[in-house]
Image: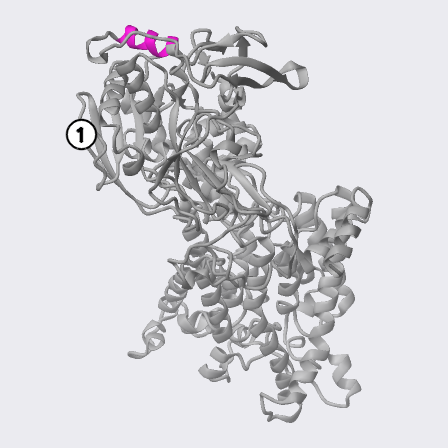
Amino acid sequence: MSKDIRIKKGLDLKLKGEAEKQLSDVARSKVYAIKPSDFHGVVPKMILKEGTTVKAGETIFFSKKDEAVKFVSPVSGTIQEIIRGEKRVILEIRILADSQDVHLEHSKKNPKTLSSSEVREHLLASGCWPFIKQRPYDVVANSVDEPRAIFVSGINSAPLEGDLDFVLKEKKEVLEAGFSALTKLTSGKVHVTVSPKSDFMPSVEGVVIHKGKGVHPVGLVSTQIAKIDPINKGEKVWTVQIEDVAIIGELFLTGKFNPERIIALTGSGFEKPSYVKALINAQINDVVAGNLKEGNYRIISGNVLTGDKKSKEDSLGFYHNQVTVIPEGDDYDFFGWNIPRPNKFSVYRANMFSFLTPKKKYDLNTNTNGEHRGFVLTGEYEKVCPLDIYPMQLLKAILVKDIDQMEALGIYEVAPEDFALTEYVCVSKQDHQKIVREGLDIMIKEVG
Amino acid sequence: MGLKQNLHNLKEKYRGTKFEQGFNALHTFLYLPNITTHSGAHVRDAADLKRVMNTVIMAMVPVLIFGMFNAGYQHNLAINGVAEFLTMDNFVVGLKKILPLLVVSYGVGLGIEFIFATVKKHEVEEGYLVTGMLVPLIVPIDLPLWMLAVAVAFGVIIAKELFGGTGMNVLNPALTIRAFLFFNWAAWMSGDKVWVHGAVDGITKMNGVDAISGETILGTLAANRPVTYSLQDMFFGFIPGSVGETSTFLILLGGAFLIFTGIGSARIMISSIVGAIVMGIIFNSLAGTLMPALGMGEAVSGVIGTGSKFFGLMSFPFWQHLMVGGLAFGIVYMATDPVSASQTNRGKIIYGFLIGFLSILIRVFNPAYPEGVMMAILLMNVFAPTIDHYVVQANVKRRMKRLKTQTA
């Protein structure tokens, strides 16, 4: 049954630098770098050595824990270098790209006529499996599990995130194929939540479409799961980003793994915030080419709340559809802890007057605006957390590694991204997302 | 670059030395530090703990200044029988007495914080900025400074640092300091000789004046004598009492400011007031004075007769209880301390209600010490985690129930 979700507890951070609805191509990168750290918890086992040539879509490594889960090259070319860190952990696999892609050809398939295991095989063989993530724990799904349901968010509510109506406007056909494939993977439903005005969603049998409105985090899939059909202990559900459903759909329609994304270039650091087409793992330098302002800026792959800090030489994150560039805040501010600052935003009215201008867009920088402290204020996290969870109590349970308490307080229902807003409003400047990630990792280790 | 660059260089120089924490405390007071985010949310709210604590201090400044005027006013009133309130003389008398209290409170407290921060190698935390301001406001004006110093040391070390510092304490440090003073030097913290500057015997005799009465309204009531102050005096605070507790009006303004800024908990404040009113109404009913307290009708003979030693306080109209003694001050500035209060929204309502309820209960039944709010808050500080436990358990049970219906 379709539900209407309305989120009031949350926060829409209004930032400068929204992407204009203009799409351009970017030059092909010379090097594409895959980072295993994008896939949390996956220990890579290399198949190919340095110097071998690969086709686009050809497997480079697989997961040691779940050998059926394969990770493929986004482009055709030569494996230039495997960069290792301490204890020979693979940090990055750099692929020198050919000038034109030669794809590994799979056969075209109609997902509607395939069996569940055929769809599964196809996704695993083609390298599309890592798009599917599992809750609890927010990790790549196990290849042998059957989820209770699959959830897809069709709303982008994080700061400056791309407009899905623009990104997906010509993707109805591939989305239909993609969703048809997903319905084969679960005996339950595939739930998609879209905003009431969106019209990119095709109607597919087995897919329930929900309407969601309100403030961020309405677009986060945990919020939608909690409102539609919450996760219980022992259950597994899967989530896929809607842009990735399109990539899966294209695989079935064309027989090719085409890792092309429409990336929203956002933030005040861009001359002209807009959209570009780029391949997964493209070098950020090429993606943002000619568009960056001069100055001391931070490049973030993803949005300002959950993205990863990157340098220009780094590659786009595997799951990211956005690059945000905002000013660095590595400077002192004279009596900045005390004096009202019109260029900063606060949800509190503690000598800050941003509550007077609710529609103003801010150019926030990366300064923490204070030092790390113990938890002091209470009741503030609840105002930005729509989940039926006590955020501070859960964070404290994680800090003391109390597994029973974590479980009782609902750790199975959360992902790090759900604590991005509580992290934003935290006056004690604690790193909530990092704490939650550690908590989830403890649970993986102890409970599995 | 001047100062900013020089301080930055000094910070680098002191990094890793024993001066690091002390220097950083002073440095971050002058400059918001240059720390940036690394992962997670790359932007953060403009408010930090310093800004929050500063807001609480701002909410107390009017009370502090009023307290200085009132100290001089009560002093002159006691000596001369009549006095103006807003005179420079009053202010100076108050300033001379209260400034040393403030200096000792901050000096001793922050000194200990600096030492602990240096030894434990963590940054100096801001919690004491508020405690240090609270302490002079909740003690009698003539309290000897050495007593204050000893009490502050006790409160900061035992109630706070031993538990792990700001954010970890179970009891409100300011109230622990006051409780320490009360139980060690009761003669300086209660009775009718301490609430007006100069009322302590020794001093008045030196001045050649006979005893000044410095009795609080609660003291008068406990002795079953009629209150001589007008309602206006009580509400605006032209009455004897601890330095900052007298003006209900300014405390209400401070409370409204704290709620407006999003720092103080409206849940705790309002439920405390409700709790105090409920207990007050119960006592008024027992004493048979509920009707006159409401301004309609005559007193009837209640369960508690006029001869009872509790009659004075019990018959005192319930809504006037809110305006005398430290109740309002305790509710607004100390019950709302987020660290020692309940931390869940529902818990805050229970916690606040019980503070108000118990305050009046203790106030009425302990005529020897008719100030209940301190004990009520400390007691509820101890029970706050228990309240939270049961509130959180409701959430846990809901989750368990969902699991059962799912698997059934």
Please tell me whether mark 1 sits on a helix, a strand or a loop.
loop
Q: Residue B144 appears at what percent x and percent y?
A: 75, 70
Q: Residue A218 appears at what percent x and percent y?
A: 33, 40
Up the image or down, A210 lies above or below B119; here it is: above
Give the left or right position of residue B367, taking residue A173 as reference: right
Q: Locate residue A319: give its quadrant.
A: top left
Q: Residue at x 51, y 76 (%)?
A: B224
Within 10 Å of disc 1 (Cα), the crowding (few <14, some 14-19, many 20+) is few
Q: Locate residue B216: give its quadrant.
A: bottom right
Quadrant containing the N terminus of chain A is top left
Name the main secondary structure of what is drawn in magenta.
helix
Q: Residue at x 54, y 28 (%)?
A: A438
Q: Of the residues shown, which amino acid type is indicated by label 1?
A: Met
Give the left or right position of residue B399, taking residue B66 as reference: left
Q: Nearer the viewer, residue A118 or A447?
A: A118
Up the image or down, B208 lies above or below B340; here it is: below
Give the left or right position of residue A187, taking residue B276 as reference: left
User: Is A124 within the magenta?
Assistant: yes
Q: Nearer the viewer, residue A107 or B192?
A: A107
Looking at the rendering, the stretch of residues picked out in magenta corresponds to A116-125
Q: Nearer the viewer, residue B220 or A290?
A: A290
Q: Nearer the viewer, residue B122 or B170?
A: B122
Q: Is residue A260 visible?
A: yes
Q: Residue B270 appears at what percent x and percent y?
A: 41, 61
User: Is B217 within the magenta?
Assistant: no
Q: Is residue B180 visible?
A: no
Q: Residue at x 71, y 44 (%)?
A: B122
The residue tagged 1 is A1
The chain under label 1 reads A
